[in-house]
Structure formats: C-alpha cells, structure tokens
Image: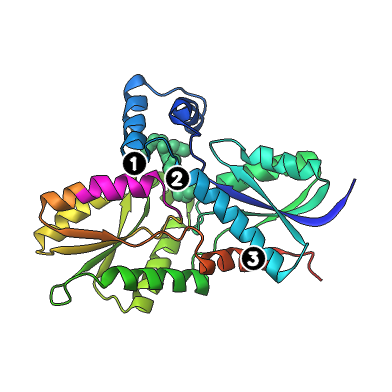
Amino acid sequence: MSNQAIGVLVMSYGTPESMDGIEEYYTHIRRGNAPTPELLAELSGRYEAVVGGVFPLRENTNRQVAGLQAELDRMHPGRYVCYQGLKHARPYIEDGVAGMAEDGIRRAIGIVLAPHYSTMSVGSYVKRAKERADELGIEMTFVESYHLHPKLIEALVDRVKAALEPFNADEPVKVLFSAHSLPVKIREMNDPYEQQLMETSAAVAEGAGVKDWQFTWQSAGRTREPWLGPDILETLKEVSSEGYKQVLAAPVGFVSDHLEVLYDLDIEAQAAARSMDMKLARIQMLNTDPLYMATLADSVLARDAWNS
Ligand SMILES: CC1=C(CCC(=O)O)c2cc3nc(cc4[nH]c(cc5[nH]c(cc1n2)c(C)c5CCC(=O)O)c(CCC(=O)O)c4C)C(CCC(=O)O)=C3C
Ligand SMILES: [Fe+2]
C-alpha cells in the first residue's frame, strides 16, 4: 500500500511517563548503563520538586505536534501527516518511523523540537531516524536547524520584552541567554551549536533593544568529562559581584516547559539569585506559540523537495 501523503517525523527529547519510569529513561540516556542509586535518587528528586506526578514535557510535545499538524493542514490540507518520535522515551524515534511505514508513507521530512544543530543533539536524532527509514524504504530529508527563522526570533523578542516590563526601569537588568551545555569535545568537531546559539541570542537582543546581555550555559551533564561553561550558577555570581540586582533568564536553547527550565532555572538558579539578593525572572517558554508553530511549518515546507 502506498500513501501519497508526506510523513513529518516530529522529534523531541522525551520524558518519563511516571516516577516509576525514571530508571528506564535514565538508563536509556546512559546508553543502556543503569544509573547508580545516588544518581537515580538525585534525578528523581529533581522531578519530584517540579512535577508532582505530571511530566510537563510529554503534554507539551503532544500539543506541539498537534499544533504543527494544524498549521500544516491550514497551509496544505491533506498533504502532511505528523508522527512523533522521542529520543529517550516511547514512542521512540524508530517507533515513529515504523508507524509511517505501517501507514504506507514513502516520503518523509524530519524536524526536531530544538532550534540549534549539534552533532550530539539534532545530529543523533537524524542518524537514528535515517537508519530506520533506510531499512523500511522511506525516503527521508531533515530540517537541521531554524535558529534564525524570523518568526522564531519575533516570538522570542516578544517574550523578552514582556519579561523585562516588571523590572525597575531605573536600575540595570542583565539578560542571560542560555542553552543546554554539551561536552567541550564538540569544539574539536567543528560543531555549529555554539555559533548558532550566539546568533540567536544576538538577534533576539537586537530585536528587543537589549544592550546589556551575555550568553551562559546551563544543565551540564553529570559525567567526568568537561562540559562547556560558564554555568549559569557561576555567571549569576559574577553578575552579582559586578553589582547587578536584576537578571532576566532567556533559555533560548529550549522550546518547552520541562525539567531543565522548571528545576535548573526556576528552583536552582532562583535560589542562588535569592541568596545573592538579586531579582531573577525568566521568559515564558514557546510551547505552542503560533509563531513557533509557523516556524516549524515553514521549515518543513522549505524541506519538501517533492512539492512541485
Ligand atoms: C543538547 C541537549 C538538549 C537540548 C536539545 C534537545 O532538546 O534535544 C537536551 C534537552 C533535554 N535534556 C533533558 C533531560 C536530561 N538530559 C540528560 C543528559 C544529557 N543531555 C544532553 C544534551 C541535551 N539535552 C547530553 C549530552 C546529556 C548527557 C548524556 C548523553 O550523552 O546523552 C539527563 C541525564 C541526567 C543529567 O545529566 O542531568 C536528563 C534527565 C530534557 C528532558 C527534561 C524533562 O524530562 O522534562 C531535555 C528537553
Ligand atoms: Fe539533556
């Protein structure tokens, strides 16, 4: 059975389904190596602190996939069918590709719910999808990044402006753009991740009229190898020692409310800022912002080589 529709594999990091699923999830992230009891307890503690039985990334990813489908239907009724594929949870990336094959899809486009390309992030999603698609005879192309898409920048500019409003306008505010750290070894691979993040940050700062900003990393992994820094906790100390009392966190490397934002920023960084007597606010995440949904849809259409 052949299906003329174009499959759209929407890929995201994935999150456990419940507290009981954290060990399996963490084992998958660690490539099959079960975490030590200490590591497991530490991660479970972070989820417990924010979610209380709900894992917001799952709902948000579901809503983003539905939002993209609706936007594609509006632009090209009936041409595209979205499937979900997660990196570390079910439905896995391979399950999403298999679902397309079951429906008779022969041609597909892959896109990741993360704007910036790294071989260690988007590159690994693409590799897994492509391997399964090759096995199943699906012709597949990929959106690699969309970090400077004008609608993405506009959505982030709106959020920075809105989040700056409640600050005291007579005192300086430091804007800290941030993203998930990666192992320092990406620098040897000529990886575009850092440059793309700097480009997004500079474009958003310019659009929002922000002059006083810097980029910082967050959420480095718990491994022995060195990760990109400085971490936001160090940067907050530095900014405090320079005399700042007001800071806005703009985690432009993420598109959804999830652990790295709700714990690492809203609980951990917030506590650090409070201890230094600084006011720390955060921009709202994109989630299903119509401008973000349009960014994804535009990027899919631009990759549709079969569109005559
Ligand atoms: C680049 C990047 C993004 C952004 C791009 C993208 O979205 O893809 C991202 C997002 C996310 N990372 C997340 C969670 C975790 N990441 C971990 C560990 C790791 N992340 C890495 C990279 C990234 N991660 C890497 C290189 C590791 C080390 C292990 C490995 O080499 O793979 C660990 C293990 C424990 C720890 O180290 O903290 C957890 C729990 C969640 C979901 C939160 C939720 O459930 O709400 C999200 C959205
Ligand atoms: Fe991560």
At mark 1, the secondary structure is helix
Residue 4 counted in the magenta span: no
Q: Is residue 185 left or right of residue 300?
A: left
The image quadrant of residue 99 is top right
* Residue under the point 36% across and 58% down: 251
**First of labels 1, 3 by sequence position:** 1
Q: CA distance from mark 2 to mark 1?
A: 9 Å
* Residue under the point 58% across and 42% down: 86
Q: Among all residues in the image, which is located at the extreme front? A: 53
Q: Is residue 124 left or right of residue 241?
A: right
Mark 3 sits on what residue? 71
Three-letter amino acid code at the position of disc 2? Pro
Three-letter amino acid code at the position of disc 1? Val
Q: Main secondary structure of the magenta part?
A: helix
Residue 268 counted in the magenta span: yes
Q: CA distance from mark 2 to mark 3?
A: 22 Å
Mark 1 sits on what residue? 50
Q: Position of residue 298 (x, y in %)?
A: 62, 69
Mark 2 sits on what residue? 56
- Disc 2 + disc 1, Cβ < 8 Å: yes
**First of labels 2, 3 by sequence position:** 2
Q: Which residues are magenta?
A: 256-270
Label 2 within 8 A of ligand 1 by Cβ: yes
Label 1 within 8 A of ligand 1 by Cβ: no
Q: CA distance from mark 1 to mark 3?
A: 31 Å
